[in-house]
Amino acid sequence: MSDGLMAVKPIIGINTDFRPSRKEHAALSFVAAGYFDGIAASGGIPVILPPLADEDDLVRLLDVLDGVVMVGGSDLDPRRDGYMPHPSVRPMDPRREDFDRLLAKHVCARHMPVLAIGSGMQLLNITEGGTLFLHLPEDLPRAIPHKDPTDLAHRHALLVERGSVMERVYGDGEIRVNSMHHMAIDDVAASFRVTARAPDGVVEAIESIVEEWTAIGVQFHPEAETASALDAKIFEEFVIGITGEVPEMKLVA
């Protein structure tokens, strides 16, 4: 590459949600704009990944990607991980979950850079051998509210660990993040350490302890309209983890 060319941006895949066909619309594969806007604003090139059924096709895609964002959404089906079903669980569409679990398997096997959000973080932890609480109000009765159906902007405090990506994002001072979940990480997989918790101890962020694996998971949603400007810096830290430098465009010589 000549000195006159700009820095090469990392290509980052983003999985999608899925809804089957209904009377009012055909089958849809979709993703909230905050995910790809967050990556683009941080110096990456977002690429949308539909819920493919062919594993070889997914492998081919991963060969050309520099990282993956695993998005949030509805609940993982607990029966797939040996749990009894719970009435509070609202499973995501099986077509999406089939693809997401395949994606997570290959991302973890490759130690590919990954930013996992919401149920994406839960799946990342499960894939590496961790476990989940299925319903916080029952599993941890003394937990603070982590979801308020009447308030989509519901927030709670966040306590971050020193020496973590979360500390670089938030620094010192009072931190509050959005919260819209009823499932959460229970046992943390051996590949990760907890880097942020809610005041009640519920895990809100994990980061890889595996050498040279950039893997960040957050239970809250930095892509949402209820996110703060600081929350959005999580995308920037993810891109830095891939490129090794603060994303910027080089001047043309």
Image: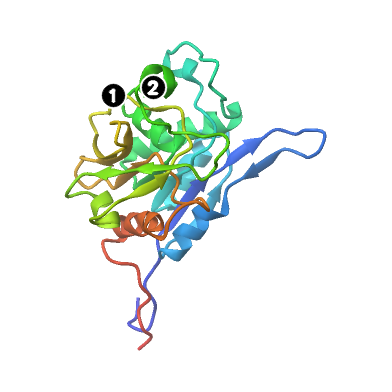
Closer to the camera in the image, 131 or 113: 131
Q: Earlier in the sequence, mark 1 or mark 2?
A: 2
Quadrant showing the C terminus: bottom left
Q: Is residue 59 left or right of residue 237?
A: right
Query: How does the figure colour the protein chain or chains?
Result: rainbow
Residue 20, position as x, y percentages in the image: 70, 33
Mark 2 belongs to which amino acid? Phe
Closer to the camera in the image, 46 or 150: 150
Closer to the camera in the image, 247 or 206: 206
Mark 1 belongs to which amino acid? Asp
Mark count: 2
Q: Which mark is residue 124?
A: none
Q: Is residue 58 above or below residue 79?
A: below
Q: Is residue 193 left or right of residue 106?
A: left
Which residue extends farthest top?
Answer: 84
Residue 172, position as x, y percentages in the image: 23, 55
Pointer 1 with pointer 2, Cβ within 8 A:
no
Q: Which mark is residue 187?
A: 1
Residue 7, position as x, y percentages in the image: 36, 72
Distance from disc 1 to disc 2, alpha carbons, whole Å, reads: 9 Å
Which residue extends farthest right?
Answer: 23
Identify which residue is drawn at 54% across, 32% down: 74
Q: Is residue 241 above or below residue 220?
A: below
Q: Is residue 30 above or below residue 170?
A: above
Q: Is residue 106 left or right of residue 190?
A: right
Q: Helix or strand or loop: what does disc 1 sit on?
A: loop
Residue under label 2, please give it.
133
